[in-house]
Amino acid sequence: MSDPVWYRSLYWRIALGFVALLATLLAVQGLVFLWLTGRVAAVWPGRSATELATSIAADLSQELTAHPDTDISEYVNRRYQSAFRSFEVVMRDGRVAASRRVLPPQSITRAAGVHLFGDSAIPPRLLGRRPFGRGDFPQTPRDSDGPSADTPRWRDGRRGDSRGPGGFDNPQIRFDFAPIVVAGVESGVVAVPVDPPPLTLAMRDLGPTLGVVALGLLVAGTAIGALLVFRPTHRRLRGLQEAARAVGAGATGVRASERGGDEVTALAHAFNEMAMQLEQRTQALEAVDRTRRQLVADVSHELSTPLAAIRGYVETLAMPDLPIDAPTRARYLQIVAEETERLEHLVGDLLEVGRLEGGGGALSIDAVPVAQLFQRLRHRHEQVLGEKQIQLETSETPAGLVIDVDQKRFEQALQNLVSNAVRHTPAGGRITVSAETEASGVRIVVQDSGPGIAHEHLERVFDRFYKVDESRTGTALPSGSGLGLSIVRAIVERHGGRISAGNAPDGGARFEIVLPQKRETE
């Protein structure tokens, strides 16, 4: 599996997820703070100084018209308890009301009085009045030399005086005013500082709210991050862990989920490949074990027959009280010799199969003419062919065909095939051996005119000790050891070729060898 795409990478997803989470937290915190401090008046109307003053003045005008004796302090603080701006209400009858949530500066009373009564007509009762013992903004030094350019200028062009009792505490503070009109007469004024309170006051007032919001956002962000990032990953890692435990317990067919496309997916893919290879090796070991058990059983069975015969006849010959004439003794000894020779051939064939299948012994590859191989086949079986009156026909296409093989080994394979064909071809039959070139190499076919091979036996004819004589009829030769065709397959595969068994259309067994080479004489 290739490396995961960067945007699917677990590390990138975690990093981008937390960056997005922090950005969201900061944005929400900033919006909450701005909303609470009234700095986004364009978005939330009624939060600017002018709008707040106008709103309070309009409400008081309506309320005092209907109820002249209303407690204006209780009224405005109940109606505008959520406003984060300071304000003060000054009535002509001397009533004064100020915001309680955010305390206004001391100079606001004189500023309201100047706006309502004029600079020289401020009632003495308003000078120095500090409703509710409120705190002040940070003060600046008083101006002792009279009005100057720093003296605050009102919206109507007048300047305030910073001298004397009740003078302005901070000449930098500016106010917005809105008249309170009752029965068509300006009965009072609402003063609101143009600039918002200092940040320290805002933080003191908004700190608990911001803390609760921050804690809520942290909990919500952690929950969202856990659900979107860690929970899916944890679920897949848990599945991978369970699959690993199952494989460790012997269930090699278990596979982990490969969904996602990130590092966990790459790990699951590697685990599945390991599990698949482990399953294949386990199956191969089981197959080898079954083959070993079957081989031991087959070898024991094949060896027991000649050994039992040898033991029986030897014990008979050794019996002192049993009179045996010379011809009978000679016949017994001949049987013992034949069984001993059969046992030697069987052991030799077993060693040969083991050596070939195990890759033992290097092949000596030479350019061998096919005609020479066919001639040696004819000489080797000439006697038995004559006795059974079987015709052996050979052909090669093109003439003078040469193949690159180990002559000794490959001739042994062809001899075994022809011996098998002779054994199962009835008297007067025919055996054909042909060789021809094709695109994939050289094809060599050995075919007889016997009864053929039953379909259920075709897939197992090359297994060790497997015999299909019961599927052949009309034969008089004894069965072989069951290792000849196994030796043939091992030799062909050592040459890089393949061999298959089948039946010819007109009857008889057909063995086909394909060698992956093609060489012709010039």
Image: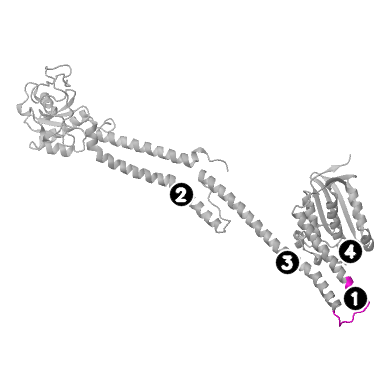
Q: Are marks 4 and 3 in contact (CB under 8 Å)?
A: no
Of marks 2 and 4, the one in the foreground: 2
Q: Amino acid at mark 3?
A: Ala
Q: Which residue has dot 3 on it?
A: 297
Q: Secondary structure at mark 4?
A: loop
Mark 1 residue element? helix
Residue 450, image x, y percentages:
86, 61
Is 66 displayed left or right of 415 in the figure? left
Task: Give the secondary structure at mark 3.
Answer: helix
Residue 266 pos. (x, y %): 54, 45
The Cα atoms of the two marked residues, 1 and 2, are separated by: 85 Å
Q: Please name the amino acid that badge 4 sits on.
A: Pro
Amino acid beneath label 1: Arg
- Tell me the mark number nearer the camera, choosing from 4 and 3: 3
Secondary element at tag 2: helix
**Could you tell me the amino acid type at mark 2?**
His
- For the point 53% across and 50% down, which residue is it? 257
Residue for point 60% across, 52% down: 276
Quote the CA–CA distance across marks 4 and 1. Answer: 34 Å
* Callout 1 crowding tier (Cα within 10 Å): few <14, some 14–19, many ≥20: some
Which numbered disc, 3 or 1, marks the residue closer to the eye? 1
Magenta residue span: 319-334
Question: Residue 122 at what x, y percent from top left?
Answer: 7, 24
First in sequence: mark 2 or mark 4? 2
Q: Which mark is residue 426?
A: 4
425 or 71: nearer the viewer? 425
**Nearer mark to the viewer, of 3 and 2:** 3
Q: Which one is earlier in the sequence, the residue at label 3 or at label 1?
A: 3
Mark 1, residue position: 329
